[in-house]
Amino acid sequence: MSNRNSQANKQAARERIRAERERQKKQERLRRQLVVAGAVVGILAVAGGIGFAVMKANEPTGWEAAKEAKPVAPKHTEGKDHTEILIGDPKAKETLEVFEDVRCPACASFEQSSGRALLKDIEDGRYRVRFTMYTFIDDNAGGEGSKNALSALGAALDVGPEAFLKYKTALYSTKYHPDEREDLYAKDSELLKVAGEVPELKNNKAFRTAVEKGTYDRWAMDMTALFGRKGVRGTPTFMHGDKKLVMDQIPQRQMTQAQYNQLAMANFRKMIDKEFGPAKGTDGGKGGGKGIREGEKDPSGAR
């Protein structure tokens, strides 16, 4: 082999080595760039994920979220936010206002002893009743049974006023009403079990769906926002116009439940007769006092 060929071969070999090194350097630079780019993407993805998680964590949930939900009001309601539940003969000249909380033991006691008398007066057209349902026991005792039961009552009201009244009676009944410390009505299954006592609600698929989906949760929250209306912060409370009605106290003595219920109903009737005059069959059903008449604006300015 000539010296010239040997030199040429060495030069060619060096070029190949240099080219291979350049190729390896380019690959290494590309690899580093891809690693850095991947890290940036990863950081952004993690940051985005954290941001999304934080945003989700800050979003309201449960009943707080219900406040922001699209309003869906039951049929048979009135007023700006459909929070007026007026039941009875539209021709009735007087309106009795009743304030209750479904978990309230005193409300349950009233309903169990005197609820029939109230329903009879409504049926007789003696007055209409505006029900304002509170849920303050959820805050005081913890839980969400008052709100959940109120939402279910909205579903019953959507079926009809009769279904609402019967369902409310069943919820307060001795058979179903729980101790206020036991949040049973937070369970949809319990509310649906109670609804089995009401013919209009039993096997009613639309009612069941509304309860399970919380269709009237926002409406329940709008009703809850009325707490303190007309200065009422305890239940049960009865008002006629701006006047708070007061029942006589039941004597503190040993008695049976039947005796207690009899005295409680007598006191309720006495309070109502004093305010509205004797019922039909006594003096012709003449009423007294000022109530919220048909088309009349609430003088207190409250909703």
Image (spheres, rainbow, N blue to C red):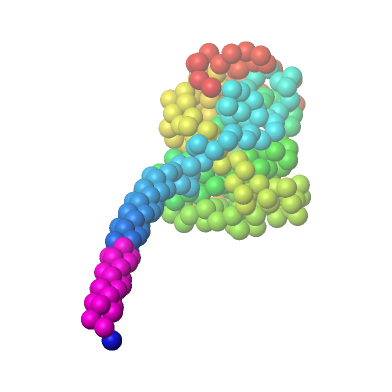
Residue 102 within the magenta-colored segment of the rendering: no
Q: How many marks?
A: 0
Residue displayed at 48% across by 54% down: 183
Residue in front for this viewpoint, 248 or 88 = 88
Residue in front for this viewpoint, 268 or 6 = 6
Residue 204 at x, y percent in the picture = 75, 51
Residue displayed at 54% across by 47% down: 148
Residue 23 within the magenta-colored segment of the rendering: yes
Residue in front for this viewpoint, 216 or 263 = 216
Residue 119 at x, y percent in the picture = 68, 36
- Which residues are the magenta region? 2-28
Image-based side of 224 in relation to 82, left or right: left
Residue 256 visible in image: no
Image-based side of 253 in relation to 122, left or right: left
Residue 44 at x, y percent in the picture = 35, 51
Q: Main secondary structure of the magenta part?
A: helix
Quarter of the image with the N terminus is bottom left
- Position of 139 relative to 231 (above/below): below
Image-based side of 73 in relation to 64, left or right: right
Residue displayed at 75% across by 55% down: 203
Residue displayed at 60% across by 40% down: 216
Residue in front for this viewpoint, 260 or 34 = 34
Image-based side of 249 in relation to 121, left or right: left
Please tell me in which quadrant of the rendered image residue 277 appears. top right
- Position of 168 relative to 7 (above/below): above
Residue 193 visible in image: yes
- Position of 276 relative to 178 (above/below): above
Please tell me in which quadrant of the rendered image residue 261 appears. top right
